[in-house]
Amino acid sequence: KKAQATTFAILGLVIVTLTVTLVYFREEIFSGIGKQALQEQPTIEAIENVRSFTQDCIEESLIVGTDILGAQGGYIFLPEDEFPSAPYNVLSNSVDMFGDGNFKVPYWSYTTPNNLERLQVPTKQMMETQLADYVDREMLICINDYQQFNLEGYDISYVTPETTIDIGKEAVIADVKMPLNVVFKDSAQRFEKFKVTHEVPLGNLHAQAIEL
C-alpha cells in the first residue's frame, strides 16, 4: 500500500500541473475586479460582481484543495506520526518526496519502530471532510472580508460558510451554505448558497489506487 499512496500522489501531481495555468489567470481576474470602478456600473451588475467574486473564491479553494488531496495521497492535513522521523528512527508514516521536509506523502501502510503494522488509508468520507474544512478556511482568506468592495461603497454582511463536499468518480462538487447580503446604492440582494463543480476524476483515482 506504500505504492498505492505514491501512485495516487503521482496522479495527483498531474492534476496540479494541468491547473497551474488556470489558477494563474484566475488570480489575474481577482486583481482586475479590485481595480474596476464598480460604482460606475449598473447596481444589478455591481451586485452580481460580488456573487461572481465569491463563486470564484470557492472555485479557487476547491481546485487547490483537490490538488493537495491528490498530491498528498488523499490527505490535506497529514496524519500525526506517533514516532516522528529522527536520526535514530528511519521509519515514518510518510515519505519525504524531495528530502527537505516540505512535501510529505503519507504511507497507506507502514511498520512502526516497534514492529507494529499500521494502516492509514484515506476514506472518501475523510477526504470530503478535509476538503470541506479547507474550502471553508481558504475561501474566507480569498474574499478578505470583501474589503475591496467595501471601499467602493458596498454594505456586505455574511455568515461563516459551511461547505459540503461530494467526491464523485469524474467530478468534485462543493455545496457552500453562506447567507450573503449585498447592498449597493439603491439595490439589495441576498444569496443563500453557492455550488461549484470541479471536473476532475478524483473518485476514480482513489478507487484505482485502492485496487492496486
Image (cartoon, grey):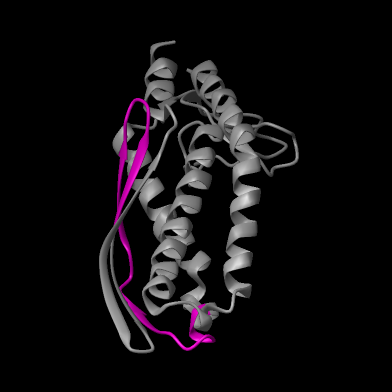
Asked which quadrant contains residue 119, the reply is: top left
Q: Quadrant of the C terminus?
A: top left
Q: Residue at x 62, y 66 (%)?
A: 32
The answer to whether residue 160 is left or right of residue 15 is: left
Q: Nearer the viewer, residue 106 or 131?
A: 131
Q: Residue at x 31, y 83 (%)?
A: 187
Q: Where is residue 164 shown, x and y percent of the image?
A: 28, 50
Q: Nearer the viewer, residue 92 or 164?
A: 164
Q: Which residues are magenta?
A: 149-176
Instruction: Please say whether residue 84 is one of the residues in the magenta stretch.
Output: no
Inspect this view and state whether residue 121 appears: no
**Rendered view: 184 above or below 51:** below
- Residue furthest to the top in view is 212
Instruction: Please say whether residue 172 is one of the residues in the magenta stretch.
Output: yes
Q: Where is residue 22 shown, x and y percent of the image?
A: 60, 43
Inspect this view and state whether residue 139 appears: yes
The answer to whether residue 185 is left or right of residue 88 is: left
The answer to whether residue 171 is left or right of residue 26 is: left
**Rendered view: 172 above or below 31:** above
The number of numbered discs placed on residues in the rendered structure image is 0
**Rendered view: 1 above or below 178:** above
Q: Where is residue 68 shown, x and y percent of the image?
A: 53, 41
Q: Residue at x 49, y 85 (%)?
A: 150
